[in-house]
């Protein structure tokens, strides 16, 4: 898997993607126990001083819609770039986004990324809370649409300080409300009634159970909330 990650990172050059510094197959590890391992495939990435977006969200809690737009402006730019090159990430989450000392977001960990048949994928990959329902239901899926779903989860956490649901499954109380269109009850249950109508409209579309009804990156960029 690491060889595929190296291949993908070699082809990506964007200010919001962690840079590949070096890689090789002659890595050497000396463990504290004295055991040594040689000829290990390794990958070296640039150091990002600000740490994980996950830690920032835990520290700051609710950051609001302006912070959400600041984040989305950068992430939409990088996803537009990747998707135009035919690359999908498939594991967008708070832990895979770093923040540098200038408050720039850097997408990292391309271990689940792919550039092959991205509109007809069937691998069961991702992280539970961010995983689109079509992956959980073991259906063929479009990697671009699952990236949009996961991005929506991250956006919600930044804006509201909590996760929108635990999993995108029928058994999840909150996601079931979204799936059944019980939006007023959903926003009341998640204490998000005071968020703007534009934000609510966008986030509901990004969480659509039907992936074909999720907005594309271009449509999100043009959405009234982003203006």
Image (cartoon, helix red, strand yellow):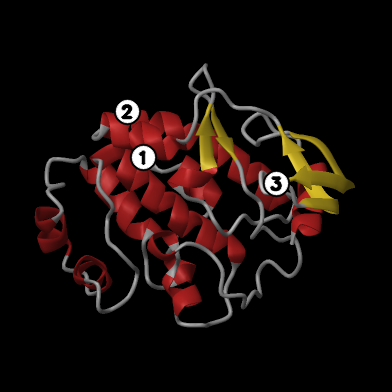
Residue 49 in the image: above or below residue 168? above
Tell me if mark 2 has few (under 14), some (14-19) or many (20+) residues whose alpha carbon lies within 10 angstroms of its own. few
Mark 1 in CB contact with mark 3 (< 8 angstroms): no
Question: Which image quadrant: the C terminus?
Answer: top left
> Residue 31's mark?
3
Which badge, 1 or 3, is on the more N-terminal residue? 3
Residue 5 in the image: above or below residue 125? above
Q: Mark 1 points at which residue?
A: 224
Q: Mark 2 points at which residue?
A: 66
Secondary element at image label 3: loop
Q: x and y percent of residue 72 in the render?
A: 45, 37
Residue that appears at 47% across and 35% down: 52
Residue that appears at 83% across and 45% down: 28
Q: x and y percent of residue 190 in the render?
A: 15, 53
Residue 129 in the image: above or below residue 219? below
Q: x and y percent of residue 161 in the render?
A: 25, 41
- State the separation of the CA atoms marked 1 and 3: 54 Å
Q: x and y percent of residue 45 in the render?
A: 71, 35
Tell me if mark 1 has few (under 14), some (14-19) or many (20+) residues whose alpha carbon lies within 10 angstroms of its own. few
Single out the mark in the foreground, 1 or 3: 3
Which badge, 2 or 1, is on the more N-terminal residue? 2
Mark 2 in CB contact with mark 3 (< 8 angstroms): no
Q: Is residue 87 left or right of residue 147?
A: right
Q: Is residue 13 left or right of residue 91?
A: right
Residue furthest to the front: 34
């Amino acid at each position: 898997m690491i060889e595929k990650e190296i291949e993908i990172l070699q082809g990506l050059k964007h200010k919001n993607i962690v840079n590949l510094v070096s890689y090789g197959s002659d890595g050497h590890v000396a463990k504290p126990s004295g055991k040594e391992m040689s000829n290990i495939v390794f990958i070296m990435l640039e150091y990002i001083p600000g740490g994980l977006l996950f830690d920032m969200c835990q520290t700051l809690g609710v950051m609001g819609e302006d912070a959400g737009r600041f984040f989305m402006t950068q992430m939409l730019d990088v996803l537009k770039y990747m998707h135009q090159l035919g690359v999908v990430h498939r594991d967008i989450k708070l832990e895979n986004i770093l923040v540098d000392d200038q408050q720039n977001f850097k997408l990292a960990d391309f271990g689940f990324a792919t550039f092959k048949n991205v509109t007809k994928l069937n691998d069961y990959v991702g992280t539970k809370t961010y995983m689109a329902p079509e992956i959980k239901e073991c259906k063929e899926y479009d990697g671009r649409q699952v990236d949009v779903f996961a991005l929506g989860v991250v956006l919600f956490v930044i804006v509201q300080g909590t996760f929108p649901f635990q999993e995108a499954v029928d058994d999840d109380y909150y996601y079931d409300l979204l799936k059944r269109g019980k939006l007023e009850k959903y926003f009341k249950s998640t204490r998000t009634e005071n968020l703007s109508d534009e934000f609510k409209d966008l986030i509901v579309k990004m969480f659509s159970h039907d992936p074909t009804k999720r907005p594309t990156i271009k449509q999100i960029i043009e959405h009234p909330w982003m203006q």
